[in-house]
Image (spheres, rainbow, N blue to C red):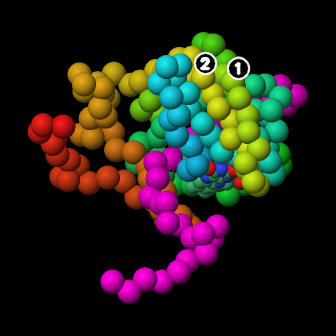
Amino acid sequence: MDLKTLQPGASYFYYPRPLCVVGVWDQGKNRANFVPVAWGGPLASRPPLFGVSLSPTTYSHELIAKTGEFSLSFLPWEAVEWVAKLGAVSGRTLDKVQTFGLQLVEAEVISAPLLAQAYVAAECKVVARHLLGDQTLYVGEVVRVVAREGVFADDGTLRLEVATPILYLGANRYLTVDKETLVAVDGV
Ligand SMILES: Cc1cc2nc3c(=O)[nH]c(=O)nc-3n(C[C@H](O)[C@H](O)[C@H](O)COP(=O)(O)O)c2cc1C
């Protein structure tokens, strides 16, 4: 195999990755803000921790620093167009909920709402934050998870015939999963 050296900080070697949308409450403006996040993922199960890595330049970063809370919404493939658009503008200069006509569901534990179109969503309280290079890793303890009826199988896995996730490939490219490739591997 011929190997080509890539710039570690400038290549998309870790994509595709599942995409989630982080929601934050803006107390001053009395409105919610939403941002797509590809650099996020589960960190622990006891307690349940989920990390999101945000640039300090984002409005969402500022709002999480203020409130110590964020929501996570996982959207089905059908929502890809508007989810992508949420990442092209900042809530500092426009109301994303109004601009994109987002339908919200009130959270029970935190102030930031959830996105109504999500097939699963979670409420998180920040328990740690780490400055990592040019990003901040906000570590949230997941305090509540809600899912659409029938979205998960008995073993807890996502039923792809009900919802397919949005994956990000880098640049302006998105994809979903091919249900036909699903296998259950015996003996592991
Ligand atoms: C698909 C996608 C994924 C993104 N993932 C992240 C991420 O993980 N962390 C981050 O800081 N910005 C990420 N961004 C960029 C922010 O979404 C973008 O800077 C956004 O305008 C910030 O909005 P805000 O200022 O309202 O918070 C992503 C953008 C897109 C389109």
Residue at image location 42% in from the left, 32% down from the top = 119
Q: Which mark is residue 78?
A: none
Q: Which amino acid does label 1 sit on?
A: Ser
Quadrant hosting residue 141: top right
The answer as to whether callout 2 falls within 8 Å of ligand 1 is no
Q: What element carries label 2?
A: loop
Q: What stretch is highlighted in magenta?
A: 1-29
Residue 107: numbered disc = 2
Report whether 89 appears left or right of 80: right
Taking the spot 71% from the left edge, 29% from the top edge, the residue there is 128
Q: What element carries label 1?
A: loop
Taking the image as shown, residue 111 lies to the left or right of residue 28, namely: left
Q: Which residue lies furthest to the left in this view?
A: 186
In this view, the residue in front, 110 or 128, is 128
What percent of the width, then of the height, locates residue 63? 79, 34
Q: What residue is disc 1 on? A: 111
Which corner quadrant of the image does residue 113 belong to? top right
- Magenta run includes residue 26: yes
